[in-house]
Image (spheres, rainbow, N blue to C red):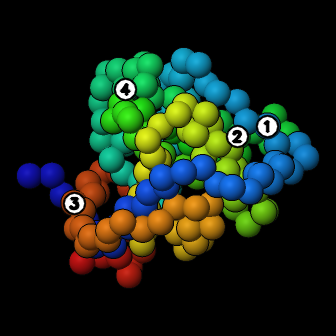
Amino acid sequence: MEPVVRVAVNVTFLRMDRPPAEAPPSLPPGFQLVRVAAPTVGFYRYLYDTVGGDYVWWLRRTLPDEDLASLLGDPAVSLYTLYAGGEPAGFFELDARGRPDVNLGYFGLMPHVIGGGVGYAFLRRAVDIVWRMNPRGMTVNTCTADHPRALPTYLRAGFRPVRQVREVWNVPTRLGLRIPEHLRV
């Protein structure tokens, strides 16, 4: 049996049933959003590991490269990268495999960008892209391992909580993730 660290989190599932009424804020000067047409596994892992490193993002780290490549090649899954001054500043992943709803599967900023005031404008880009797809609704979830401003930012964007569950994860120690003491079981 593989050694694991047991991590307890509260997961909040959120939903949006209509696009926000107000216009989105502009991205700050020097920021640009780019859809990655055919993301490589290496590029995706760089984004995922860097953005999620402080927030116990672990599931995709355990996915074999072939499975991740298949997921990234699915036309219902799309990846967008935020750039600042030519370098990655964050990313989000949209998953329309559950149509008519679209799920914001992953969303986050690189550590050097957090706190710079771009998060809400970046999230609104994701929300607006989804609503141009004409879904029935949009979903996302966040948990107590995520950045403390994640849930308030989702609420500000127009998501509403639909349920909350307590989960205990068995995070493989081989991943080398920093697990905050307050999340350990």
* Residue 47 in sight here: no
* For the residues bearing labels 2 and 4, Cβ distance under 8 angstroms: no
Instruction: Decide if residue 158 is on the left or right side of residue 182.
Output: right
* Residue position for label 2: 82
Asked whether the residues under the numbered discs 1 and 4 touch, taking CB atoms below 8 Å apart as contact, a structural biologist would say no
Q: Amino acid at mark 1?
A: Gln
- For residue 63, the mark is none
Q: Distance of mark 3 from mark 4, alpha carbons?
A: 23 Å
* Residues tagged 2 and 1 counted as in contact (Cβ below 8 A): yes
Residue type indicated by callout 2:
Leu
How many numbered markers are drawn? 4
**Which mark is first along the chain, 4 or 3?**
4
Q: Position of residue 74 (x, y in %)?
A: 40, 21
Q: Quadrant of residue 177?
A: bottom left
The CA span between labels 1 and 4 is 25 Å
- In primary-sequence order, the first of circles 2 and 4 is 4
Location of mark 1 (residue): 32
**Circles 3, 4 touching at the beta carbon (< 8 Å):** no
The numbered disc on residue 170 is 3
Residue drawn 74% across and 57% down?
A: 22
Residue at 30 percent across and 51 percent down: it is 174
Label 4: state its secondary structure.
helix
x 30%, y 30%: residue: 64
Quote the CA–CA distance across marks 2 and 4: 21 Å
Mark 2 vs mark 3, CA separation in Å: 31 Å
Q: CA distance from mark 3 to mark 1?
A: 37 Å
Label 2: state its secondary structure. strand
- The numbered dot on residue 71 is 4
Whichever of labels 3 and 1 marks the residue nearer the N terminus, that label is: 1
Could you say where residue 45 lies in the image, as x and y percent from the top left? 48, 36
